[in-house]
Image: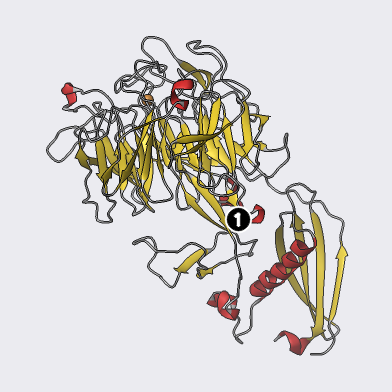
């Protein structure tokens, strides 16, 4: 094809890359306070409040309720009938996708709310907006308030701890130091757990996660107060007591947040556990919140805590969210005080408006980034959840015994969408087929363990590094992210479908890839070369093609701007030169 010249050279230039930051947008009204929430389908979130008089949550018969289904597409809520008080309860999915809510609080006759302490509620998500909650009162083995629930590897649900009565801090006479297991065929009886006695009085809403890999595989990490243990639920025995965590109290009402960190095939899914925030002093409502985090490598035979700061912001009642790119987001909560209701005096103040991004792969001291602050306080009884477009749904805040308007920290019905930086910084692939199925998000797609799944997507703009993660956004309440989990999936192959990869508008009249396609193609090649040479760095490659004729030759020049967040920007110019006939 005639003469072809490729030359690379750096040209001196300075590029100012605009700081891509996060955004907050008010989305819609939740109708009931988002005290508990969980994504049920790609477009719906179930919201469960305690029994209270939410003035806009009217059922068809005119009565009020304290549950709703929030639609992310229409930004509207649909009231759901409840008959028991779901005050400070818990939830999880069965392996078959049925949602289960259990526990709650005392009867509230004024609202026709029955005793919820031993209540069980099922909800089978549907697409047509007709499904309702099915309640079975008094089915738990014992009262559970502030219990934790978790989907087990068997598809059953673990129901762990709590108290038998609503309270501030827990106490021996209100403690429920037991667990029970729910399976689709019924309940097991309660099993006693000494750890839930030893961690009094700060063991409500204990943190519990399955350890999915490594030498403790199949056991559970349980954390309450400052203590933790690796636990064998099957045989109901503690396997290994872990060292006391440095820093303050982490459990209600000195509420912090905990998560199993994202799991990554690149380190063989090594499990790590992170706990952040809380409060060191009980009933000291003007005391600054805990400003530390502790992290533990559960892949170790002898796990130890590594202490870190909490991004420079003391925070009690944080919410923790796994983002789709594997970063961990902390938001909501307050910088003074503790969890609980304001009854004449503020238990918490100084809303912690600034979200924090945690990068688990960075060395100690370099993991935190502050993002654009919120404007709506999200105090006690707030939630946040990753949703399917990669943004974060944020709702709730009601540190009041009942629905309240006006004053400081009223009942908050506004839901917001928080758009993390990675959404606006990158073009996202549009998935058109998943395992051969083109009708997405309407019915479950079954994937077996270890199965390779073909995904077909289209991508306009510059193809970046394609990554894939699978996420369980968790049941959200009281800073708990029950069952939340993220796994980085290994991509075995990315194949281009040829020119069809580019949409028709990128083809010129002769059926050749247009200049636009040319830019994208060269940028992708360039990026592949760079990522082979420097696999640990992240790049943005921004191509800009120019062409001109000179002395009978047609030239295409490609200026390529390379940007890594840790480095200053570099520019390259690629010159592709050839006879005019090569560039029809
Ligand atoms: Cu509560």
Q: Is residue 575 shown above or below 425?
A: below
Q: Is residue 269 shown above or below 245?
A: below
Q: Quadrant of the C terminus?
A: bottom right
Task: Write down the residue under mark 1.
Answer: 426
Q: Residue at x 43, y 13 (%)?
A: 346
x, y (%) of residue 178? 37, 30
Q: Is residue 317 shown above or below 324?
A: above
Q: Is residue 555 left or right of residue 35?
A: right
Q: Residue at x 79, y 48 (%)?
A: 567
551 or 69, nearer to the observer: 69
Q: Residue at x 74, y 54 (%)?
A: 536
Choose top left, top right, bottom left or bottom right for residue 289: top right
x, y (%) of residue 506? 59, 75
Task: Describe the colour scheme in one phrase.
Answer: secondary structure
486 or 29, nearer to the observer: 486
- Ligand 1: give its quadrant: top left
Q: Residue at x 83, y 83 (%)?
A: 4
Can the viewer see residue 263? Answer: yes
Can the viewer see residue 379? Answer: no
Q: Secondary structure at mark 1?
A: loop
For the residue carrying disc 1, how many other residues have a C-alpha within 10 Å: few (<14), some (14-19), or many (20+)? Answer: some
Q: In this figure, what is the number of numbered marks?
A: 1
x, y (%) of residue 44? 34, 49
Q: Is residue 343 left or right of residue 557?
A: left
Q: Quadrant of the N terminus?
A: bottom right
Q: Is residue 118 left or right of residue 537?
A: left
x, y (%) of residue 128? 24, 56
Q: Is residue 474 left or right of residue 15?
A: left
Mark 1 sits near ligand 1, with its Cβ under 8 Å away: no
419 or 174, nearer to the observer: 174
Choose top left, top right, bottom left or bottom right for residue 355: top right
């Amino acid at each position: 094809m005639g003469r072809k010249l490729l030359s690379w050279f750096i040209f001196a230039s300075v590029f100012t890359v605009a700081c891509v930051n996060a955004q907050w947008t008010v989305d819609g009204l939740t109708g009931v306070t988002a005290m508990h929430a969980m994504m049920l389908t790609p477009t719906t979130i179930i919201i469960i409040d305690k029994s209270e008089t939410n003035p806009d949550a009217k059922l068809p018969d005119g009565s009020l309720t304290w549950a709703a289904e929030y639609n992310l597409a229409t930004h509207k809520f649909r009231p759901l009938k409840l008959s028991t008080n779901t005050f400070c309860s818990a939830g999880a999915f069965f392996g078959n996708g049925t949602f289960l809510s259990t526990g709650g609080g005392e009867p509230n006759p004024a609202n026709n709310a029955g005793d919820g302490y031993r209540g069980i509620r099922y909800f089978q998500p549907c697409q047509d907006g007709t499904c309702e909650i099915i309640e079975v009162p008094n089915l738990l083995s014992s009262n559970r308030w502030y219990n934790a629930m978790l989907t087990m590897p068997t598809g059953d649900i673990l129901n762990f701890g709590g108290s038998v009565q609503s309270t501030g801090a827990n106490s021996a006479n209100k403690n429920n130091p037991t667990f029970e297991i729910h399976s689709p065929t019924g309940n097991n009886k309660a099993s006693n757990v000494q750890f839930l006695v030893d961690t009094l009085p700060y063991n409500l809403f204990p943190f519990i996660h399955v350890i999915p890999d490594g030498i403790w595989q199949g056991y559970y990490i349980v954390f309450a107060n400052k203590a933790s243990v690796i636990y064998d639920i099957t045989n109901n025995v503690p396997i290994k007591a872990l060292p006391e965590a440095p820093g303050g109290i982490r459990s209600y009402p000195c509420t912090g947040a905990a998560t199993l960190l994202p799991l990554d095939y690149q380190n063989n899914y090594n499990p790590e556990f992170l706990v952040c925030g809380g409060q060191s002093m009980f009933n000291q409502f003007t005391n600054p919140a805990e400003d530390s985090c502790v992290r533990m490598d559960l892949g170790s035979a002898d796990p130890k805590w590594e202490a870190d700061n909490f991004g420079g912001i003391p925070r009690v009642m944080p919410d923790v969210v796994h983002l789709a790119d594997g970063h961990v987001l902390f938001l909501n909560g307050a910088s003074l005080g503790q969890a609980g209701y304001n009854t004449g005096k503020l238990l918490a103040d100084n809303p912690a408006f600034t979200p924090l991004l945690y990068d688990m792969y960075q060395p100690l001291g370099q993991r935190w980034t502050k993002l654009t602050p919120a404007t709506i306080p999200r105090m006690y009884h707030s939630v946040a959840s990753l949703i399917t477009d990669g943004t974060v749904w944020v709702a709730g805040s009601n540190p009041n015994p009942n629905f309240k308007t006006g004053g400081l920290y009223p009942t908050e019905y506004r839901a917001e969408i928080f758009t993390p930086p990675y959404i606006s910084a990158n073009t996202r692939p549009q998935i058109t087929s998943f395992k051969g199925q083109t009708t997405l998000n309407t019915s479950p797609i079954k994937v077996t363990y270890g199965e390779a799944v073909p995904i077909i997507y289209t991508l306009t703009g510059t193809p970046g590094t394609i990554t894939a993660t699978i996420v369980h956004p968790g049941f959200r309440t009281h800073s708990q992210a029950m069952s939340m989990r993220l796994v980085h999936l290994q991509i075995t192959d990315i194949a281009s479908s040829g020119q069809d990869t580019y949409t028709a508008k990128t083809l010129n009249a002769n059926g050749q890839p247009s200049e636009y396609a040319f830019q994208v193609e060269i940028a992708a090649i360039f990026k592949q070369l760079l990522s082979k040479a420097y696999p640990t760095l992240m790049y943005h490659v921004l191509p800009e093609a120019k062409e001109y004729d000179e002395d009978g030759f047609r030239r295409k020049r490609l200026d390529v701007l390379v940007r890594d967040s840790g480095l200053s920007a570099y520019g390259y110019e690629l010159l592709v030169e050839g006879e005019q006939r090569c560039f029809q």
